[in-house]
Image (cartoon, grey):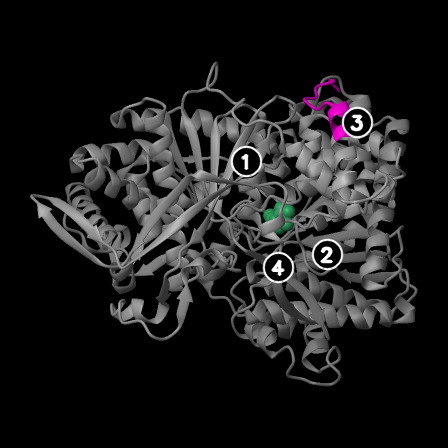
Amino acid sequence: MSNFSIYDIELFNKQVQKYSKYFDVDSPKQFTLAQWYEVISRFSLDIHYGKSSVQGREKRHVNYLSMEFLIGRLTGNNLMNLGCYEQIATYLKKYDVELVDVLEQERDPALGNGGLGRLAACYLDSMASIAQNATGYGLHYQYGLFKQYFEKGEQKEKADTWNRDHYPWHTFNSSKTQEVFFGGKIKLVADDKYEWAPDLVIEGYAFDLPIVGYKNDIVQPLRLWEANSEQSFNLEKFNNGDFLNADEVIINAKSLTQVLYPNDNHPNGQKLRLMQQYFHCACSVADILSRHLAQGHTLSEFGQYQVIQLNDTHPTLAIPELMRMLLDQYDMTWTQAWKICNETFAYTNHTLLPEALEQWDLALFKTLLPRHYQIVKKIDRTFKEKVVEKFGDDEQVWEKVAILNNDKIRMANLCVVTCFAVNGVAQIHSDLIVTDLFPEYYQLFPNKFCNVTNGITPRRWIRQANPQLSNLLDRSIEGDWTKDLNLLKGIEKFSHDSGFKEEYYRIKQNNKAVLADEIKKTLGLSVNQEAIFDVQIKRFHEYKRQHLNLLNIIATYQSLKDNPNQDFTPRLFVFAGKAAPGYYLAKNIIHAINNVAEIINHDPMMKGKLQVAFLPDYRVSLAEKIIPAADVSEQISMAGKEASGTGNMKLALNGALTLGTLDGANVEIAEMVGKEHIFLFGHTVDSIRKLLAEGYHPRNYYDENEVLKNAIDFLATGKASNGDKTTFNLMLDNLLNHDPFLVFADFESYVDTQKYIGEAYLNKDKWVHSAILNTARLGMFSSDRSIRDYQQRIWLKK
Ligand SMILES: *Cc1c(COP(=O)(O)O)cnc(C)c1O
């Protein structure tokens, strides 16, 4: 590794001594871990911004707009990227302090729900690390995603106070404050010239977090906006347009950025959410405009110097907002302003689930954003001419591609019509966008559509999460694989080397021991470390099919009870993940898993054979503990439903073998590692089409498959709920009568594949060989590669 470091350990030492006075102790020996955490973080923050000058770099600045950034703990990551982790760790040893213990003091800033927010965080890391000029724009939520805990097996939520106001890694940037308008009236002041007299003005305060490039002297901001105002507003009155006579449900305007909406892959229809979205966009667009002009560029050059990447449709309002600014503040014509928007915006689609596509109620939209309503209407009208030109006056086509439809405004449509690029997040997903979701748009704009397969940052997901494996890779590979993940190919030649394999295996076992400790600590459960660690860690959603996993666990339990002497490879099933608080079916699945776990873990016959550990409060720092210890990675979504997934990449990179459907990035993982080193099962997108066309009847599977019937009946007869037969009705009725995600159709194939995995694990030599090849062949899933794809396919193209 290079000696790169912009840290001066002597300066750090002085700081430590100074803090002794500040903390009023005789010696740093008396610092608490929390105080060490504060000293280290604050000192590291003194690195300077602005080193990331444009010189020698692409001139186009990427503005990454996302409502979520799931950044995880920053201190350890920043020390590593600054190249001073080892120095600090060594320094602390003088005081008998372990750096890892200090780092445990940080609460994850949980400013995101799941994959989408984590992707944004990985992309910021990669842009800083490969020297792509970029600013991340998000919201400074006071409460991040709720904390999850279990009570009698059920999920409970409590507020996540991440101590925003004392967080050491951000700074209030008072020169960047913006004003945001809401409601009110539009006045026509001259020909085609409008003025907005708002009802409510909220200030946006900028809080900057440093995104530190990996050992390259680059620091770029993640700018998070926080609402501030002395005014109050009435949420109810927005709907009926009676905004000024507010008297009930008064909300302090400051609370606009209080909470992150806890839904994943599901829109939040609330007014407050629309206000959050606009607040985010208005602050960000104004900031981008003023940075652009301050750099001495003209407005007509905007698209040459700026790209605005929309992370899903959540920041779509940036489009009409930029239009409004150019038209009303900078006196541009419609044609000029529209051209700039076409050159500037690019949209990343994250889902095909129809229920997850955002639509806003027009009446609400009009009251809240009257000027934007006019602008969107004009975009819609102008677009219609283009559609008629191409398809004639075909009502059916217009019905599908219109932006305004049935008193709704469809955000994805606004994005596709405006943006110069639209990308999906894995090849299969990008193909389905073109064939299933937007076929008419594809005919209109074939050149807009492209694929950029998601990626993960190797800095956090190996170097930080798996130090032992990193050490082995450092010793076995020439060059820094952290910067060029394709260098991992270099360990392929050791996949038959018994010494290397032994070491690789020992590291996995060490990581399993660490996770076993964590499980013991949180759940009081002692697990068998020789068992297969089979993990499913992700948000709870029907399409991700945690209930398919559960049904196999029940079936396995029943089989072991009936036939205790059968050959069986011990299993530990690990779960982690949250359900949205209002998603009762997903919470019902969590409840069932916990109750089944309780029974299995307390059955003396199962001891060391079959165990289930559901770790509460899934978050980035917990993921970092589970992933290095996994043997099997459950990626079992219904084919066609998981846009990409990134958990699948993190796990495979750390040597877990994937048990998955041909969905999302699993398809590309299978191509990269080879079919022999991954366990595929279940229906494909094509076979599902056929099945559904013939008519799908889940009850037939239940009637005809005894193993499935027994597993379902275990829950239906109250065996996991103290005899109460209704506890899991929500889930059971859904499965038996609808099963929209084809759990029953894939059950048999899943159970068979799980059996096969049990046998495969017995051949340690072959298993470790496959695991090594997974690590070796996962280089393309570095988010550095994703960012280079964005550069080549989108940002540098126009
Ligand atoms: C990677 C990650 C996710 C995404 O997981 P998927 O399996 O791709 O859904 C969600 N949450 C956290 C904390 C993560 O680190």
Q: Position of residue 797 (x, y in %)?
A: 37, 25
Kindly identify the residue that appears in the image at 72 percent across and 74 percent down: 710
- 518 vs 649, left or right, is right
Q: CA distance from mark 1 to mark 2?
A: 38 Å
Q: Amino acid at mark 4?
A: Asp
Considering only vertical position in the picture, is 124 above or below 265? above
> Label 4 near label 2: C-beta < 8 Å?
no
> Label 3 near label 1: C-beta < 8 Å?
no
| Crowd around label 1: few <14 · some 14–19 · many ≥20 (10 Å) | many
Residue at the spot of label 2: 752
Region rendered in magenta? 1-14
Mark before the other along the chain sequence, 1 or 3: 3
Q: CA distance from mark 2 to mark 3?
A: 50 Å
Mark drawn on residue 87: 3
Between circles 2 and 4, the one closer to the viewer is: 4
Residue that lies at the very extreme toward the left in this rendered image: 191
Q: Is residue 11 magenta?
A: yes
Q: Nearer the viewer, residue 21 or 388?
A: 21
Mark before the other along the chain sequence, 2 or 4: 4
Q: Amino acid at mark 1?
A: Tyr
Name which quarter of the figure residue 8 lies in.
top right
Q: Nearer the viewer, residue 682 or 371?
A: 371
Q: Position of residue 672 (x, y in %)?
A: 63, 32
Name which quarter of the figure residue 329 lies in.
top left
Q: Position of residue 706 (x, y in %)?
A: 71, 72
Number of dots carrying numbers? 4
Residue at the spot of label 1: 123
Residue at the spot of label 4: 160
Q: Position of residue 745 (x, y in %)?
A: 59, 62
